[in-house]
Amino acid sequence: MVRMKEFPISHDKFFYEAYLYYNPMFLMSMMVWLWGLNMYGFLEARIPYAKVFDLEYDHLTHHDIWKIASCMTVVVLTSMTAYLYFYSQNMILEAALQPILLYVLMSVLLWLPSNVLYMRTRFDFLRTIVRLTFPIQTVSFAESLMADVLTSLAKPISDMERSICRMYHHQATTGACLEADAVCGGHSIYTPCILAFPYFSRFLQCLRQYRDTKDEMFLHNALKYATTSAIIFLPVLKYHVAPELWVSQVKPLWLMCTVLNSCCLFYWDITNDWEFGLLSSPWGARKQYLRPILLYRQHWVYYWAIGSNLVMRCAWTYKLSSHLRHNFKLVFFFSVLEMLRRFQWIFFRVEVAAIKLPSYCHCPTQVKILRFFVKGK
């Protein structure tokens, strides 16, 4: 075990450590807030998301989701405030205990076998995580969507692994986080492996879906997730090859893979996940940039989503590259952008799934009649 050093570190290293410990929990809390906003948006647009996700009648509402997000946010901010206070008072040991207590408390609340704090929902979430890790059964729409969300949380999950590693090795508040060759440093092989895990899980899901449906689209989707590994693992070579080789061959290859992967992901978002006809019009001879059935009344949001998705798809690879993680402020900014991109992606992905429901009304005349009776009621 590495003994904890009880002496202050520089401000830059201190803020990086605070970021490393609290960034994962903060971003996950933010994702819960955004999921509550998604549910509220579905409700306002009258999208039957409960049928899409095959939820029971007493499922959590957006108010319940926001209660969970509020509790998570309060706990994280309280722990971070205590961490900053103790460190400012040069109480290094007390400061180092705060992230440990935070992670233990969050784990206990998640696994608590008591009928409080939405126990059934918590256990359903844990079962879903297990099914994502070992996708040996039929993959539901909810499971595939959660796996996609986890790909957007790959960087916070990776930071969580580094945080737990540092706490286990008694490195909290020592400043060793910026020593890349140290235990739990940036050169650790575990970092890219944890980053790649959500994509590998989604890759296995696509293979399982192909086995069940024999639809080649799932093989193409699996290839899309497999190519992400090049973006994650190529930067690791920077620390294991000669600098000349990195600059002349490996880095250009990484840049080329980044551009190609971003273009493929954008094309897949628009054409397959959202089923817009902007890049390939499957809706007939007449060119249609969107699709015949749109459930959101303001059509400008579709064009905004397409443009913003392109910009944020080009930026998301920055946070997956371990050789760029030293600029943690910029990485945090791109991580937030990726979560916002996923937030808006969910709206249109669920919209497409709702349109495909067998019980959903596709006739515009029937839609007008239903709206007439709803208004009359």
Image: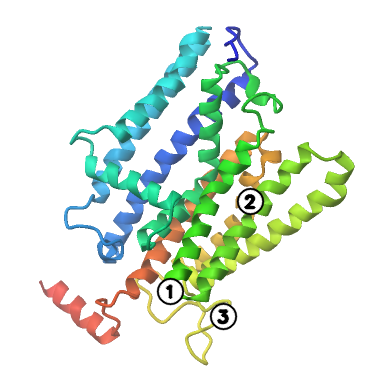
Spatial CA distance of label 3 from label 1 is 23 Å
Q: Which amino acid type is shown beneath numbered disc 2?
A: Thr
Say if residue 48 shows up in the picture: yes
Q: Residue at x 23, y 40 (%)?
A: 119
**Residue tagged 2:** 317
Q: Residue 47's image quarter?
A: bottom left
Lower sequence index among marks 3 and 2: 3
Which SS class for mark 1?
Answer: helix
Q: Nearer the viewer, mark 3 or mark 1?
A: 1
Spatial CA distance of label 3 from label 2 is 25 Å
Residue 21: mark in rendering: none
Pick the front one: 361 or 194: 194
Picture quarter with the C terminus? bottom left
Spatial CA distance of label 1 from label 2 is 31 Å
Q: How many marks?
A: 3
Judge the density around disc 2: few (<14), some (14-19), many (≥20) Cα neighbours within 10 Å: many
Q: Where residue 88 sits: x, y (%)?
A: 52, 11
* Outermost bottom residue: 285
**Residue tagged 3:** 280
Q: Where residue 64 sits: x, y (%)?
A: 24, 44
Which SS class for mark 3?
Answer: loop
- On screen, residue 307 above or below 341: below
**Residue tagged 1:** 213
**Residues at circles 3 and 1 in contact by the CB criterion of under 8 Å:** no
- On screen, residue 70 above or below 104: below
